[in-house]
Amino acid sequence: MTASYRAVNMSLVVGICLSIILTTSYGLANCHHRLRNIYPTFDSLPVLEDVGEPLILTSYIQSGDVDMARKLAKVSEEPFVGLVTSYSGYLTVNPDLNSNLFFWFFPAEFGYEEAPLLLWLQGGPGVSSLFGLFGENGPFSVDETGSKLIRRPSSWHRNHSIIYIDSPVGTGYSFTERDEGYATNQTQIGSELYTALLQFLWLFPELQTHDFFITGESYAGKYIPALGYTIYKNNPLSDLKINLKGLAIGNGFTDPLTQSRSADLLFSLGLIDRKYADGLRSREDQFVEALSTGNYSEAYNINAGFSDVYSGVCRIENEYNYLDNAPSHFDDGSYTIFVQDADVRRALHVGNSSFSNGDLVSEHLVDELLVSVKPWVEELLNNSFRVVFYNGQLDLAVPYMASEAMFQTLNFDGAEEYARANRTWWYVEGVLAGYFKSAGTLTEILVRDAGHMVPTDQPAYALDLLRRVIEDRFD
């Protein structure tokens, strides 16, 4: 795929599926189906000088040489000298296929000894978690030229240890040597993340008893429950039990069946008229009928007809924040220039690995697009894990209305309580930040004046939200 092709304006599966659509109207058998996203597009840059080999830490961990592994993984070269303490490298998740997940870990700046451990996963599918690090909640961002680091005062690492993983294999700096190494379903993604996480906790054994939370956004609305469910199922028989406390999913695409309608929302916002809304609603009904009866080929064919809803009909430039027609410089993908710099490659121990744009990841997950992970969410809720869904008010890609439709259908012990629950105001420093509702271990939150990337649009709100998730305090 060329960069120009990947940059073509996109819409949503039936209006809301994460700005991910199929670019043809053929059935499942057509090999040209692919998933789409509107994260920054870029090309992998050639490596023109000796930057070494990727640092794979698994052999050190397995042999018990953890001290050497940590020494090698420490990020201690320019341009990161004197900024923050961090560690990076690779964890092998399938030795037969040489499949390796890249991680970058930031210990909590304050209170590391007791601070909770967070994992951040990006969506796409196929978008590097470094997008979240540099663009949303990490210790620093980059300037418009992609050459200078800028400290972020609202970084999540100040009071929480946080690990960013490029997942699934083939995303960002993660790589595999064989085509079979690319994930084709969420079970595989959850299993490989679990394998990597166990190794990480052997590398940092002091964190094994710390509270652990899985966080992320967008298409990670599937990855996060997949990993949570895998931990839940494996913990009883594992020597190392991961201290999972909860999930925090931002604007997450989790259940295509219930998150498949946008006509009423677009009409209520005045972005389409009644005539177009009626036609769109009819097509949505057809999509839901096809999907609910397992006719995936027909569902694919139907959703291909919605490729022009936002850019063509509504003339919306940014589905991730429909009031923002001038996206920030970060949407240019400037971080992708920075992380492919030779000095940065050496510092992060990625060596000559390609920084992938995610095309192959998307292609291998095409048959998984319409598969739900809602049953895993329900099982986690029924086993006392905290599950928090938060939505930015201005997001059209995965709008609150679509997520709320899913909440209404969740089959869990707190379902009746949720149906009766009242919405509560949420204030941050005296300002109305949004609204939340809780039942059982489920909490849903609407974040005001934010789009798809809540930590970017409202960093103070996101920090307060994170604190409430960890403290389990929504009152």
Image (cartoon, grey):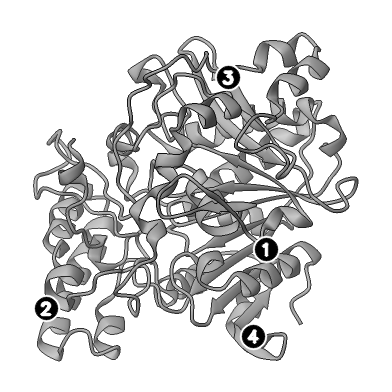
Viewer-proximal residue, 404 or 290?
404
Cα distance in 3D space between marks 2 and 3: 49 Å
Residue to which mark 2 is pinned: 279
Asked if residue 204 is positioned above or below residue 452 in the image, the reply reads: above
Q: Amino acid at mark 4?
A: Ala
Residue to which mark 1 is pinned: 153
Of mark 2 and mark 3, the one earlier in the sequence is: 3
C-beta proximity under 8 Å, tags 1 and 4: no
Disc on res. 92: 3
Residue shown at 14% from the left, 37% from the top = 32
Check disc 2 and report its element: helix, strand or loop.
helix
Residue to which mark 4 is pinned: 421
Viewer-proximal residue, 101 or 48?
48
Whether residue 266 can be seen here: yes
Within-10-Å neighbours for mark 4: few <14, some 14–19, many 20+: few
Check disc 1 and report its element: helix, strand or loop.
loop
135 sits to left or right of 459 = left
Please provide percent x and percent y for residue 456: 52, 65
Of mark 2 and mark 1, the one earlier in the sequence is: 1
C-beta proximity under 8 Å, tags 3 and 4: no
Please provide percent x and percent y for residue 409: 48, 69
Residue shown at 79% from the left, 35% from the top = 241
Of mark 1 and mark 4, the one earlier in the sequence is: 1
Q: Which is in the foreground here, disc 2 or disc 3?
A: 3
Disc on res. 35: none
Check disc 3 and report its element: helix, strand or loop.
strand
